Amino acid sequence: MSGELFSQTLLVGINLGAFYALIALGFTLMFGIMGVLNMAHGTIYMVGAMIAFYIYGQAGLSFFIALPLAMLITGLFGVLVERFLIRPSGGELLQVWLITVALWLGLQGVAYLVFGFIARGVPPPVTGTTTVLGLGISNYRLLIIGVAAVLIGGVYYLIHRTKIGLAMRAVEEDKIAATIQGVNLNMLNGFVFLVGFALAGAAGALMAPAYSISPTIGLTPLLKAFMIVALGGMGSVPGAIAGGMLLGLADSFLGVQFGMSMAYILTWIMIIVILIFRPKGLMGAY
Amino acid sequence: MLLMGLLLVLALATLPFTSACTTEDGEDGEDGEGPTSIRMGLSTPLSGDAAAWGIAQLRAVEMLADEYNAEGGIYIEAAGEKLLIEVIAYDDKYTPSETTICATRLIEQDEVHFIHNMGEEMATTIAPMAREAGIIQWGTSWELSDPNPDFPLSFSDLMRNQEMYAALITWFHEQHPEVTNIGSWALNNAGGLLEHGIIEATAGDLGMDVVFWDVFDWGTTDFTPLILPALDAGVEAFFSSSAPPDAVGNFIKQARDLGFDGYFCITMSETHWIAEIAGYENAEGLIDIGEIGEPIPAAAQKYADAYLEKYGPPLSTMCLIPWLQGSQPLFQAIERTQSLIAEVIAEELRTGTFITVGGECWFGGAEFYGIDNQIQMPMPISVCMDGVPVTVDWVVAAPYPD
Amino acid sequence: MRTRKSIVILAALIALAIVLFTMPFVLSSYLLLVLILILIYLLPAMSMRVSLLAGQTNIGVVAFFAIGGYASAILSMKLGVPVLFALLGGGLIAALVGLLLGSMIMKMGDLYFLILTWGFLELTRSVAIKAVPLTNGPFGLVNIPPISIGGIVLSRVPEYFFILFVTVLVLVILYRVEYSRLGLTWKGIAQAPSLSEAVGVNVYRFKLISFIISCFVAGLGGALYAHHMGVLQPVMFTFLLATTVILWNVLGGVGSFWGPVVGTVFLLLIVEPLRGLASSEMITYAAILIVVIIFLPGGLITLPDRLLPLIRRLRRKGKTAKAGVEGGGA
């Protein structure tokens, strides 16, 4: 592999890694704290992208308004889902799983009705390139990495430096003890759904200018999220970041070296090998 | 328990005999009164990754049905009057297992006279069913289920890789003889792999070199691991035939982002959408064969208006042109023969010529497939200019290889 | 002593048997096709249950479905094995692969077991696409011979009875297994793994047995599927299909043996009237899922249990009302 190809592959890998880490974040949070495998994760990502399409692409508002708006809307939707779908069902894991599957399918159906089947696109919010280490990288890609870093940092701050973050960590460790200590589980669950959905929506909105927008774009983020949290450790935020970066670099290097379909096989083999030697993932808490 | 077991084994042993006795499930067929409507069935992807093609196919058929129905339908001799056209469509999600159910339902329950389908795996599944039911299969697929003398009622209503792709490469070479290094990227499915075979053969004959090729799976949005080594290998022009419009849009955007300034060539896609996804600047110069660009021929304009009225913007020229062109011969054949009998219509299709929005077309290909069931028509070549496809040329299919 | 409940169940079973036997003569070819597919899909559904009983979520059920299908098809097409034996062969080969895979991953916690079996599914599909000489790659296998006994090909109606026979047989066997000591041990392991280990149960071995049985049943189902459809393509075997199989189990109810049966039948039947609605199909389907799970969190199988108290309450109201009238009228 030539030097230039190597640097470009590395750059692409880091870009993908940031994207993947952001995708995995919301997913691992929901699983770690509530044990919820959010099958609708990819669909919320899709919704975030579509919101960005309407607010930024169609209405012409600034991308930097569209992105937080997308997070707000999807986050609020998460709260509503928790309150009106999850809680009435009893909150048992199997039932919740099924509801997220129903959400996945139902929202996709709504997307077909409202958005249509035609894939659309929006232009990048920033143009031009910057030279980093002798290579040109588009400013938009830098923006993605930057925003992802900010969001990840924000989540870290939330979990480790705020009271509600403390409550989340407490529930993750021992739900019953946490309740005894005064944690209001209902409110906390609502909050976790808010954050989980908002992060998924943020990822979708952020990546809207990078890829096409259509009802089917949610499947890949869901599958990647699964793979990343398996790699990094279920329920571990640093794990999601490490797993995301690792997967991004793997996708890039293996893809360039062996072709894309072969890379997929190799990535799975990599995950399997890692899990055999470290059954709890790279930084697993479970 | 033992007794139950013996009984069951006995029951099992009788099965082969009942097989001989049971009459084959035949269609009810029309009762002595004759047909009451013309029923077109579609088993096509209306959701999922292939929905862009499936919905395009459905809408083209619907528009044609509307057009004829506005005049009262098509006159069928056996009925003694004009019959209205009914369009029945089921979403087969581009999977063969669903296709079987959809097709069975269309044939046995809805008793359609014609069955349209999308995709090679699906066409393969439906062909024997259509043959058994004695109805015409109007198949859209790129490879694998080639027209075949064993299935005289299965027609291919689209120019396929063998016809289109070779013509595209030849045209491109004439326009840009200085380009020698080409890259091929295709879906990781039957069509994609066969597509690659054609590009290798044709390009080789013309003195071009396929310096890079790779396949991708459905749902891929990030093509950078594919583009990087291609650029490293010195690709000057990218060719793809099987990629859906959103994949093409993503591909172009990412390739340009990585510094590629060469050519993109595709077949029968939807340039408007691609340009929006990729960015108008990036998509400038995109070459598409089989897509009629601006200005839309007068014959197609009324369909464009009808489309916007019925389905609303944005307009899909993919609905408008390729599938319209493909379906018009069928409707015209019914009109001419005034019949719903498959063999009669099939004969008319094979021997007649038809006028479509794109000009004249006929069915041929016997020298290559063994039967004249492959549509033949001059193909437009359009180039993307400022986000809009502009027709620059018309070509005929390259001659079939020996 | 026959309790009322067991008489009702017996009557229901007899009614069911009559219905199942007359179906093919009453139904149209299309509905019969749907029914056959339901019967075939019952096998992977039950296979998933077998895994779930032991506390494992075996996404790989779809992979073994594929392996069984391909194995059976290849045995009959390339090695000339008669279809009946090929069917069995498909199941056995799937079980064998399951043994190999299982022995490697059985010690994992359920979550990682899920991920690994999913990885296995992805790898299986990728192998099916790449191993062209064996599986014909993405083109898939076509013209797989239909089921035949003694050289006579079974037409649609006898084919239905054959598949019905196999499915019922498998269900009966799995029922006996679930209520045997083996089944009870699984349930114990699923509910209290450490306790089980502490009392000397070889958790690893029991989980492996559950896995192998699950793989065999899934493989057998795949083999039936292959010879029924006549076509096998790698694109059929996806994560979404695996999710659907779990869906059948959860919606039907994981607490009962009949849960997956009810869930599978219900969900596969519900799709048919919705076919043709395009995007509304997905929305309606999702809405049905949500309504069912909110009102019947235990799954569809809990419907009678939920209805019974309601019925009793209504009857009691009726009785007291009557008594009130009579008493008041005196």
Image (cartoon, coloured by chain):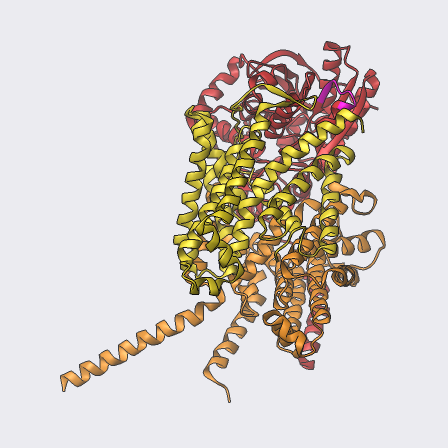
Chain colours: A yellow, B red, C orange
Say left or right for B60 vs B377: left
Say whether residue A10 is visible.
Answer: yes
What x and y, as percent, mark residue A171? 49, 58
Whether residue A233 is situated above or below residue B131 in the rendered picture: below
Toward the bottom, the furthest residue is: C1
Q: Nearer the viewer, residue B135 or C317?
A: C317
**Residue B236 within the segment the image draws in magenta:** yes
* Position of residue C240 measured from the top left corner of the image (x, y, whole percent): 60, 49
Tell me how many marks there are: 0
**Image location of residue C129, percent across then percent down:** 75, 43
Which one is in front, B282 or B217? B282
Left or right: A72 in relation to C66 = left
Image quarter for residue C163? bottom right
Instruction: Name the residue furthest front.
Output: A161
The region drawn magenta spans B232-238
Q: What is the quadrant of residue B120 in the picture?
A: top right
**Which of the pair C311/B32 is nearer the observer?**
C311
**Residue A244 covered by magenta stretch:** no
Q: Residue at x 78, y 34 (%)?
A: A257
